[in-house]
Image (cartoon, helix red, strand yellow):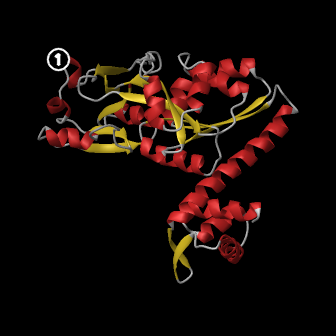
C-alpha cells in the first residue's frame, strides 16, 4: 500500500467519484489514477467502488471505512509536514480563512488588524464565496478556518463553534413609504419588490416560504451575493433590501434607513469551523479568541476532544453568545 494510492482514493471520493476531476486536481493522468485504485483494491482483497463500465457509480460500505481512515492518515501527514515547517519559524506560518463577503467586509477587518499587530510574520489568506464555495475549499483542504452562517449540512466534518448571533434588517432609501408606515409586516413588504441575497434564509423556512405561509406573493427584483451590491440597487430604487444587520454602517449608509425586522425573520448564528483532528497553531487559537472572546483557547481545545458536533453543541449551551446589530 502506497501513500500515493491513499491520496488518489481520497481525491476521487472528494470529487464525487469523478476520476477525471481527481486526476486534474492531482496533476496526473486519469488512467494512472484508475490503475492505482485497482492495485489498491487487489491488495486489500475487496472492492472500494461499484462500477458500470469504467465509471464509478458508488462507494461500497468497505470503501467508506477505508476512505475515512485514509483521509485521517492524510490529515496527520499534512499536520506533520506543517509542524516540521512551522516549528522552524515559531513566530511565523500561515492562516487561510474562507468566509462570505459580509464577514470579510464587516466583521473581520478589526479582528485581522489586531491579529496582524500580534503576528506580523503570519501570512494571511482570505477567500470569499458562498457557503457552497466555502464547503468546496474545506473539502479540498485549502483553508484552516471556515466562517459562515447556517448551511451546517455542508460541513459535517468540521468542529463548528458559535461566534455571534444576528438578524435580518430591511433597508430603504430615505423618504420611502415604509419609513413612516409603522411596525413592519410581511404584508407591507409584499407591496414592494425585494432585493436580497442569492441564497435562501437558513433555518426552518426560506424567505419564499415565509411569504407563502402568509398567503402573500414575493416579488424578487434582484438577488446578489454582496451586501454592498444589494444596497447599491436599493439606492437606485430597484426595491426594498433585506440584508444582514451587521452589513449596515451608520456612517457609510447614512443615506439609507434600516427598519427593524427581528420580529419577522428568524435569528441566525455565524460560526467558525475547523477540521476535526486538525493541528491548530497557537496563533490560530489567538485568532479564534480575537473573533469570539467567549471562545478562549482552553474551551476550544476541550471541544477538539469531542467526537460529534452534537457534543460540541451541548458544550456550548451555557456559553453566552454575543448578539451583533447595526453599527
Q: Name the residue under label 1.
A: 182
Q: Work out whether residue 139 or residue 255 is closer to the camera in this orientation and state it.
A: 139
Q: Is residue 164 above or below residue 9?
A: above
Residue beneath the point at 44% across and 35% down: 310
Q: Work out whether residue 36 or residue 283 is closer to the camera in this orientation and state it.
A: 36
Report the quarter where the C terminus lies. top left
Report the quarter where the N terminus lies. bottom right
**Residue 57, percent from left and from top:** 49, 73
Q: Can residue 134 be seen in this view?
A: yes
Residue beneath the point at 78% across and 23% down: 120
**Residue 232, percent from left and from top:** 41, 33
Q: Name the residue furthest front.
A: 45
Residue beneath the point at 20% across and 23% down: 184
Where on the picture, by quarter, is residue 41?
bottom right
Where on the picture, by quarter, is residue 30?
bottom right
Q: Is mark 1 on a helix, strand or loop?
A: loop
**Residue 105, percent from left and from top:** 54, 29
Q: Work out whether residue 325 or residue 181 is closer to the camera in this orientation and state it.
A: 325
Q: Name the residue furthest right.
A: 88
**Residue 64, percent from left and from top:** 54, 60
User: What is the crowding at mark 1: few (fewer than 14 residues within 10 Å), some, or many (at least 20)?
Assistant: few
Amino acid at each position: 500500500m502506497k501513500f500515493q494510492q491513499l491520496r488518489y482514493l481520497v481525491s476521487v471520493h472528494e470529487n464525487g467519484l469523478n476520476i477525471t476531476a481527481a486526476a486534474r486536481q492531482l496533476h496526473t493522468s486519469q488512467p494512472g489514477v484508475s490503475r492505482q485504485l485497482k492495485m489498491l483494491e487487489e491488495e486489500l482483497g475487496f472492492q472500494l467502488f461499484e462500477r458500470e463500465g469504467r465509471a464509478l457509480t458508488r462507494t461500497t460500505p468497505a470503501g467508506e471505512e477505508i476512505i475515512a481512515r485514509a483521509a485521517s492518515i492524510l490529515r496527520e501527514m499534512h499536520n506533520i509536514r506543517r509542524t516540521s515547517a512551522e516549528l522552524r519559524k515559531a513566530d511565523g506560518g500561515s492562516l487561510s480563512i474562507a468566509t462570505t463577503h459580509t464577514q470579510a467586509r464587516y466583521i473581520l477587518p478589526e479582528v485581522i488588524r489586531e491579529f496582524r499587530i500580534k503576528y506580523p510574520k503570519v501570512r494571511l489568506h482570505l477567500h470569499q464565496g458562498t457557503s457552497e464555495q466555502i464547503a468546496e475549499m474545506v473539502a479540498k483542504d485549502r483553508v484552516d478556518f471556515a466562517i459562515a452562517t447556517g448551511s451546517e449540512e455542508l460541513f459535517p466534518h468540521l468542529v463548528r463553534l458559535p461566534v455571534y448571533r444576528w438578524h435580518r434588517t430591511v433597508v430603504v432609501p430615505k423618504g420611502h413609504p415604509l419609513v413612516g408606515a409603522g411596525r413592519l409586516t410581511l404584508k407591507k413588504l409584499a407591496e414592494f419588490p425585494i432585493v436580497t441575497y442569492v441564497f435562501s434564509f437558513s433555518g426552518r423556512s426560506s424567505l419564499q416560504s415565509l411569504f407563502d405561509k402568509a398567503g402573500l406573493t414575493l416579488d424578487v427584483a434582484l438577488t446578489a451575493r454582496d451586501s454592498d451590491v444589494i444596497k447599491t440597487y436599493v439606492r437606485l430604487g430597484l426595491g426594498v433590501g433585506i440584508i444582514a444587520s451587521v452589513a449596515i454602517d451608520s456612517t457609510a449608509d447614512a443615506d439609507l434607513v434600516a427598519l427593524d425586522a427581528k420580529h419577522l425573520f428568524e435569528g441566525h448564528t455565524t460560526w467558525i469551523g475547523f477540521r476535526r483532528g486538525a493541528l491548530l497553531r497557537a496563533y490560530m487559537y489567538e485568532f479564534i479568541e480575537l473573533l469570539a472572546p467567549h471562545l478562549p483557547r482552553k474551551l476550544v481545545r476541550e471541544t477538539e476532544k469531542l467526537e460529534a458536533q452534537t457534543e460540541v453543541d451541548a458544550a456550548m449551551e451555557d456559553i453566552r453568545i454575543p448578539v451583533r446589530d447595526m453599527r
